[in-house]
């Protein structure tokens, strides 16, 4: 599998290869890889199915296809990201972890690849491989994916008590009574930026209220911890099963370090049971979640699906009108989108002369016609 990953100022190619044997007895590496040259900015991750001391110093023998593959790596000047000796594959019949899964990058990415590690908790006999590729993009945490308060687990009694205490301890909130009630003129002055004192007072009150709420929430509401790619289908049962699988795997591996594999039958049985239960629970949870999600027809599902595609990091907003801080950028937007309203000069009445109206006298006929009109309205006392 090959995909190209593009950004505003970066691009690299990702290749995923499984070195399996076809019907003619030929493996994928000599058939499709060893005669090609990787393009610049490329990442190659593969299940090599080859053993060699270069990535597994403890392997007793070297595979027949390992040396041609190493020669190809040297010709390409590729960089091996694996930590030699760190296992990536384990099955219960093995006496130790082996290294089959490899991560390679081209020279231009060698200095940008960091934090290579394995993830045994996938439930598979192949461990997950995790590493980072640094780009030139100035990335910051996505504000839409920030950790949030888990209000479903909030202790509201504690929250109310802590909020009351925080308000009592805030001098700014205790001095609110000293601020006079705002007039219409004050509102216009605030809009025009002519009353900096009142604006500063209101800003301090807003910050004090926010601080009081955050202080109470930190003590009464747990934080929702989101990983790099949170799984919508994950639940507490899977967390417990993953812990059990890791526990029995650790016991089984410790037993293998001191005894032969046939003497670790009970530990092997417990590990296999835990792993199979964990894998089946993951499949069931995925199937149930996505079936329920696809059956929904409410508009909220559209926005939830969009949220699944968002990353935890986004590129930093470039300078706006020369401003680089978040507050200054917001101020630049506000000044541009909401400029002060136009100011109209007040009229002068120095030479104003009131107009004199020459109304004709009301005749008796006009008065009788008005009083006898068929269009009548009732008053509060229903008199007509």
Image (tube, rainbow, N blue to C red):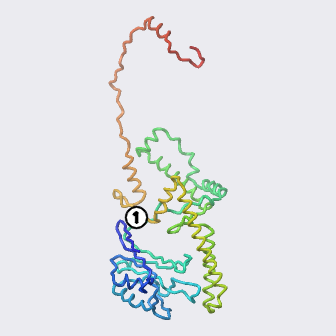
Who's the residue at 48% across and 60% down the image?
Answer: 307
| Of the pair 369 and 36, the residue shown nearer to us | 36
Closest to the observer, 37 or 7: 37
Residue 365 at x, y percent in the picture: 44, 5
Residue 323 against residue 334 in the figure, above or below = below
Residue toward you, 193 or 110:
110
Residue under label 1, please give it.
315
Residue 334, position as x, y percentages in the image? 40, 50
Decide: is 103 above or below 333: below
Quarter location, residue 247: bottom right
In the image, residue 79 sits, relative to residue 348, either above or below, namely below
Which residue is rendered at x = 53% and y = 45% of the image? 179
Q: Position of residue 254 (x, y in %)?
A: 62, 87
In which quadrant of the rendered image does the N terminus lie? bottom left
The quadrant in which the C terminus is found is: top right
Figure quadrant of residue 378 = top right
**Residue 9 percent location from the top left of the image:** 34, 67
| Helix, strand or loop status at disc 1 | strand
As rendered, which of 122 and 225 lies closer to the eye? 122
Q: Outermost residue toward the bottom?
A: 60
Which residue is drawn at the image coordinates 59% and 19% (left, top)?
Answer: 380
Q: Residues within 10 Å of mark 1 (few under 14, many from 20)?
A: some
């Amino acid at each position: 599998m090959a995909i190209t990953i593009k950004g505003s100022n970066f691009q690299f190619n990702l290749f995923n290869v499984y070195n399996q044997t076809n019907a003619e007895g030929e493996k994928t590496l000599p058939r499709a890889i060893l005669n090609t040259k990787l393009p610049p900015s490329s990442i190659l991750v593969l299940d090599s199915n080859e053993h060699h001391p270069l990535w597994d110093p403890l392997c007793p023998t070297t595979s027949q296809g390992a040396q041609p593959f190493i020669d190809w790596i040297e010709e390409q000047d590729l960089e091996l990201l694996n930590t030699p000796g760190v296992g990536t594959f384990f099955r219960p019949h093995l006496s130790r972890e082996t290294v089959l899964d490899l991560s390679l990058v081209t020279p231009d990415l060698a200095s940008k690849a960091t934090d290579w590690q394995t993830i045994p908790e996938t439930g598979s006999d192949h461990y997950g491989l995790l590493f980072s590729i640094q780009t030139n993009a100035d990335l910051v945490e996505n504000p839409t994916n920030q950790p949030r308060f888990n209000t479903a687990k909030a202790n509201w009694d504690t929250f109310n008590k802590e909020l009351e205490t925080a308000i009592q301890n805030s001098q700014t909130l205790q001095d609110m009574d000293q601020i006079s009630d705002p007039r219409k003129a004050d509102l216009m002055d605030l809009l025009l930026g002519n009353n900096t004192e009142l604006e500063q007072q209101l800003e301090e009150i807003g910050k004090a209220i926010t601080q009081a709420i955050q202080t109470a929430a930190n003590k009464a509401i747990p934080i929702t911890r989101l990983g790099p790619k949170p799984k919508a289908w994950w639940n507490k049962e899977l967390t417990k099963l993953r812990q059990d699988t890791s526990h029995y795997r650790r016991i089984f591996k410790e037993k293998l370090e001191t005894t032969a594999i046939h003497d670790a039958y009970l530990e092997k049985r417990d590990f296999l049971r835990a792993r199979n239960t964990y894998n089946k629970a993951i499949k069931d949870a995925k199937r149930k979640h996505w079936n329920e999600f696809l059956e929904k027809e409410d508009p909220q599902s559209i926005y939830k699906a969009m949220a699944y595609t968002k990353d935890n990091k986004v590129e930093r907003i470039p300078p706006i009108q020369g401003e680089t801080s978040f507050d200054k950028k917001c101020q630049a937007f506000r000044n541009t989108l909401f400029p002060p309203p136009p100011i109209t000069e007040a009229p002068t009445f120095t030479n104003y002369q009131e107009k004199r109206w020459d109304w004709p006298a009301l005749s008796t006929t006009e008065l009788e016609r008005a009083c006898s009109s068929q269009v009548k309205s009732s008053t509060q006392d229903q008199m007509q």
